[in-house]
Amino acid sequence: MLRMTGLLAGAALALALALPAAAQSPVKIGLITTLSGPGGYLGEDVRDAFTLAIEQEGGKLGGVPVQLLVEDDGLKPGQAKQVAEKFIKSEKAKILTGIIFSNVAVATVPDVLDGGAFYISPNAGPSNFAGKDCNENYFVASWQNDSLHEAAGQQATTLGYKKMAILAPNYQAGKDALAGFKRMYKGEVVAEIYTKLDQTDFSAELAQIRAAKPDAVFQFHPGSIPMVVAAPSLDNRILEAVGSAGLGIRLSSHWNTDFDNASNKQFVDAFQKKYNRVPTFYAGQGYDTALLIASALKATGGKVEDAAAFRAALRKADFPAVRGAFKFGNNQHPIQDWYALSVVKGDGDKLSLKTTSKILTNHGDVYAKDCKLSW
C-alpha cells in the first residue's frame, strides 16, 4: 500500500512538472483621462501613445503582460474619483495614471494613494504634491507645473520683453503657471488676469491687455487658441487649427518631434503611422510614462505588490525617454532640460514646431526642498 501511494505521488509530481507553467496574470493599469469636451484630444494623445507602447511589446510592458483599463473623467473631479475607486476596489489595479487637469488630480490622487496604489502622472504636476505633501507612491513623468512656465519666463527674459501681461484659468495649474512664470521673468508684469477654466470668450480680457500696453503676452490655457505661450497652449493639434496665425510664435517645451535621439525618432514615426497625425507633447509624455512603468515592471518581474521594490525601480528611471535626459528629483518629479521652440514654415509652406535652443539644463522645481522622502 505504501509502495503504491509512493508511486502515485511520484506520477502526480511528474505530471505537474510536465504541464506548462500557468500564464502570468496581466498587471492591471487604470488610465483615467479627459477624452471628451474641448480638452478631449489631450487625453486621447496620452491614451494612444500609452497603447502604442503596449502594442509594440505585444501586449506587455517590460516583458510583463498588462491590461489597460481606460475611462473618461469628463474633466469632472467627482467622476474621476468614482473611476479611481472602481479601478482600485473592483479591478484591483495597483497602478493608475492618465489625469490631464490639475483640479482633477488634486481631487483624485489622494484617494489613489490612500487605496494603496501607485499614481504615475503623464501630465498634471500640481504644486500641492511636490513639496511637504509629496508621497512615496506618487511619481510625475511630465513636469512640475511651475517648472514648465518657469522656462517660459526665462525665455521671455532672454527675448528682452520688459513688460508682460499674463493670464491663466483660475484653478491649480493656472495659479502654478503664473507663479512659475513670474519666478523666472525679470521684467514688469503690467496685468495679471485669471479666467474661468472652461471660458471661450476672451474679449474682456483682451481689452484689459490692450489697455495695459505690454510688450508681449504670456498665456496658459490648455487646448485653446494661443498668444505667447508655454507648450500647453501651442501643441501640434492647435497649430493645425490656428494655421498661418501661428507663424513666428515662440514657446518653451521639454520635448519636440524633431529631437534627435533613437527613442524619439521611432516613437514619432510609429505614432504617425498608426494614428495618421503628428503627436503632441501629451503623446510624448504618455509614451514616456508607459516606458517608465515598463522599466519598473521589468525590474520587479511584474510584482507591483512588492511596493518597496517597485518604487525603487521607478526612482531609477531606467528607460529611454523620448525627451532625452530625464531623472527624478527627491520629490519624484522630473529634472530635465527645457528648450525654445518656434513656429516655422516647412515643406509646402506647412507650419511646424522647430527646436531652436536650450533654455534650462537639468531643471527641477522649487518645491523639492520641502519634500522629506527618504530614498
Image (tube, rainbow, N blue to C red):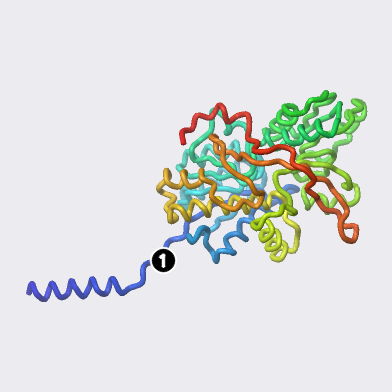
Please state if 359 lies on the left or on the right of 336 as rendered.
Answer: right
- Outermost residue toward the left in this view: 1
- Residue at 44% of width from left, 50% of height from top? 304
The three-letter amino acid code for the residue at tag 1 is Ala
Considering depth in this image, is 258 or 273 the residue closer to the camera? 258
Pick the quarter of the image with the N terminus.
bottom left
Please state if 2 lies on the left or on the right of 80 as rendered.
Answer: left
Where, by quadrant of the figure, is residue 331 drawn?
Answer: top right
Considering depth in this image, is 74 or 355 the residue closer to the camera? 355
Considering depth in this image, is 302 or 48 the residue closer to the camera? 302
- Residue at 75% of width from left, 60% of height from top? 277
| Residue 44 visible at all | no
Q: Check the image and report above or below for 127 versus 276.
A: above
Across and down, in percent, residue 169 comes to: 75, 34
- Residue at 23% of width from left, 71% of height from top? 13
| Residue 13 visible at all | yes
The residue wearing badge 1 is: 23
Across and down, in percent, residue 205 comes to: 86, 32
Please state if 43 lies on the left or on the right of 18 as rendered.
Answer: right
Across and down, in percent, residue 210 comes to: 92, 30
Please state if 328 lies on the left or on the right of 344 as rendered.
Answer: left
Across and down, in percent, residue 307 comes to: 43, 45
Q: Check the image and report above or below for 167 versus 253.
A: above
SS under mark 1: loop
